[in-house]
Image (cartoon, rainbow, N blue to C red):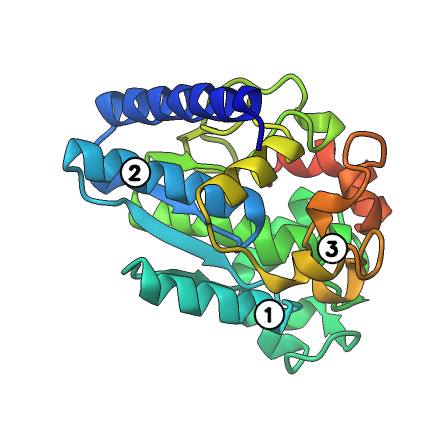
Amino acid sequence: MSKETKERNVELIEKSKEVVRDAFEKYDPAKCAITWTGGKDSTTNLWIIRQVCIEENIGLPQVITIDEGDAFPEITDFLVTISKKWHIDLKWLCNFDMLKSCQSHLGNDIQVKDLDERNQAELKRIEFNLKSFPFEAESYAGNHLMKTVVLNKFIEESNTELLFMALRRDEQAARKEDEYFTHHEAGHLMPEHTRVSPILHFTERDIWDNTHLHNLPYCPLYKIGYRSLGARTSSNPGEVGVPAWEQDIENVPERAGRRQDKEKAMERLRKLGYM
């Protein structure tokens, strides 16, 4: 790795640490939470926050992951393994009412009338008027109920004031204007909280340079060609058999292998509280 790359890495990490330290000056770490998907970005984000906690003698905030009901087993295994290695008490979040309604089986129809009051209210909030819909984690309704609703309920029930997110400006068009700190006012079914994105300034290439430079763990799916990991049934590798970091990162969209109707709806989903 070149000297320039190593110097850039030092600058990127220090900037991220400044953002994390600023967050801990403004918010009680006990009222913060870290989102972790098991992907390369959120693992880098978690690693940087852990470094600051160690350096500043601060207890690591609660770490959460959301089970959308369509996860790669490789990601689940990775989360379990690294949680043990890094001594993290990982909290698994899931919309169990949704899974109960479809017998935890992808493609099964969910009858809206069978859902609990909160889920029915959330469907009304997104103006979903059908009586039933097939269970798909990445559909507009499925994504909202399985991820956004679960996250908002966690914030409400745990009285979390700040969420650490692993967003990058270059990852998705809807995120290119993001700021490090974003305050979300309370609204209908939406709790007040602040979100902070310490690695916002990293690029995909920067993430992989950092991963290899510091020997960070990563899900094995990246080694066989996946560049962006979403739901198991709607994520595809870029170049099959070519590790993510060896692909044409600079010219081929990172999320090209993800379900595109969700990508197009990203702005709408984020207004509802999506990551």
Mark-to-mark CA distance, 2 and 3: 27 Å
Dot 3, how many residues are within 10 Å of its Cα: few (below 14), some (14-19), or many (20+)? Answer: many
In the displayed structure, 125 sits above or below 202; it is below
Where residue 51 is drawn, which disc sits there?
Answer: 2
Look at the numbered discs 2 and 3 and tell me whether their residues touch, using CB distance below 8 Å. Answer: no
Which x, y percent locates residue 45?
Answer: 45, 39
- Which residue is at the front of the view, 117 or 257? 257
Residue 90: image quadrant is bottom left
Q: Is residue 111 visible?
A: yes
Q: Residue at x 52, y 43 (%)?
A: 211
Q: Quadrant of the N terminus?
A: top right
> How far from the left and from the top, in percent, is residue 173?
75, 26
Does residue 183 appear in this view?
no
Residue displayed at 68% across by 21% down: 176
Q: Any mark on residue 226, and which? A: 3
> Could you tell whether 243 is left or right of 261 in the image?
left
The numbered disc on residue 74 is 1
Answer with left or right where residue 26 lies relative to residue 189.
Answer: left
Q: Which mark is residue 225?
A: none
